């Protein structure tokens, strides 16, 4: 049975007279991998911050994991995971210290922390690195660790803001294996990206142009709709009319 975990209706955010996010409406289902694309300045981060309960909308409505984004921001924060471009890890703590620290923040018991830490370290193959400072790890490993920490408490939804910036396609692919595992457990993945190979990995994609959602469907349906061979072509077709961005 379908279970809607993100629902927005005409959600908008204004900064003075500038409309950064302009009446976006969409739904995301449990376990879905939902790609949130758009050129620079399209409004992705602003929209995502509202959905995470970090920024108050100017108008419209939204429910995240069933919680109203105006009234229930604390409940929303407890039910989501978040990974930003700059990660959420402490570079001057070891791998194990980071895992324990975040597990503690998420309210896991000592026995759950021990069990989950061991499973995570084994899954990522970080046995030899547990005592290394996170700052010493290669970028791709930091990203994988950061994601794993963001889903340690098995949130309903994990929000990823350009999680794989600066790494090669092979490392991105390994990161995406972790995303698929989370999705199989029923965690909904909401991900912004500039990489079109990643867009292809999503169940559905929305493409934002100048604050509005210009297209929303599966990658294959979008390619059919825009008579395009690749997602790159779909994206270019939509984004080339944008007024904002570089
Ligand atoms: N606090 C703010 N005050 C005024 N304008 C803002 C504010 N935050 C964002 N904006 C503007 O809103 C627009 C959307 O920005 P946003 O960061 O959401 O875009 P984005 O799609 O995430 O872009 P990028 O891919 O570059 O991160 C931009 O024109 C930006 O300058």
Image (spheres, rainbow, N blue to C red):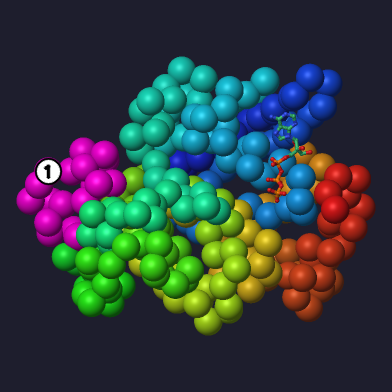
- Residue range of the region highlighted in magenta in the rendering: 100-117
Q: Cβ(mark 1) to ligand 1 < 8 Å?
A: no
* Residue 223: x %, y % from top left: 75, 70
On whether residue 122 falls in the magenta region, the answer is: no
The residue shown at (73%, 64%) is 222
Give the dominant element type of the magenta stretch: helix, strand or loop.
Answer: helix
- Asked whether residue 97 is in view, the answer is yes
**In the depicted structure, whether residue 85 falls above or below residue 123:** above
The image quarter containing residue 126 is bottom left
Tell me which residue sits at (70%, 28%) in the image.
12
Q: Would residue 105 be counted in the magenta stretch?
A: yes
| Residue named by callout 1 | 109
Q: Residue 213 in the image: x percent, y percent?
A: 74, 45
- Around disc 1, counting alpha carbons within 10 Å, would you say few (fewer than 14), some (14 to 19), or many (20 or more)? few
Residue 74 coordinates in the image, percent (x, y):
38, 25
Kind of element beneath mark 1: loop
Q: Is residue 185 above or below residue 173?
A: above
Left or right: where 39 falls relative to 165: right
Find residue 15 and report its horizontal and vertical position in percent: 75, 24
Query: Does residue 225 appear to the left or right of 73 in the view shown?
Result: right
Q: Is residue 186 left or right of residue 71?
A: left
Residue found 40% across the figure and 45% down from its top: 81
> Position of 32 compared to 206: left or right?
left
Question: Which residue is outermost to the bottom?
Answer: 170
Which is nearer the eye, 111 or 1?
Answer: 111
Q: Residue furthest left?
A: 111
Residue at x 12% of width, y 43% of height: 109
């Amino acid at each position: 049975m379908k279970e809607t975990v993100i629902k927005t209706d005409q959600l908008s955010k204004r900064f003075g007279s500038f409309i950064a996010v302009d009446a976006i409406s969409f739904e995301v289902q449990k376990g879905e991998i939902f790609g949130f694309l758009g050129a620079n300045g399209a409004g992705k981060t602003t929209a995502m911050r509202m959905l995470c309960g970090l920024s108050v909308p100017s108008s419209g409505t939204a429910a995240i994991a069933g919680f109203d984004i105006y009234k229930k921001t604390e409940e929303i924060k407890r039910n989501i995971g978040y990974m930003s471009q700059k990660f959420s890890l402490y570079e001057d703590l070891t791998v194990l210290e980071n895992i324990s620290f975040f597990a503690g923040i998420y309210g896991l018991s000592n026995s759950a922390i021990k069990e989950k830490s061991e499973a995570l370290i084994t899954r990522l193959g970080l046995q030899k690195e547990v005592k290394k400072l996170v700052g010493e790890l290669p970028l791709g490993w930091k990203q994988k660790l950061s994601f794993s920490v963001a889903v340690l408490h098995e949130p309903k939804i994990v929000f990823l803001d350009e999680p794989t910036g600066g790494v090669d396609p092979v490392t991105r692919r390994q990161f995406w294996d972790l995303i698929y595992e989370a999705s199989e457990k029923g965690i909904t993945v909401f991900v912004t990206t500039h990489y079109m190979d990643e867009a292809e990995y999503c169940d559905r994609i929305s493409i934002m142009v100048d604050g509005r959602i210009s297209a929303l469907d599966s990658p294959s349906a979008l390619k059919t709709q825009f008579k395009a061979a690749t997602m790159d072509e779909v994206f270019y077709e939509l984004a080339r009319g944008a007024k904002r961005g570089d």
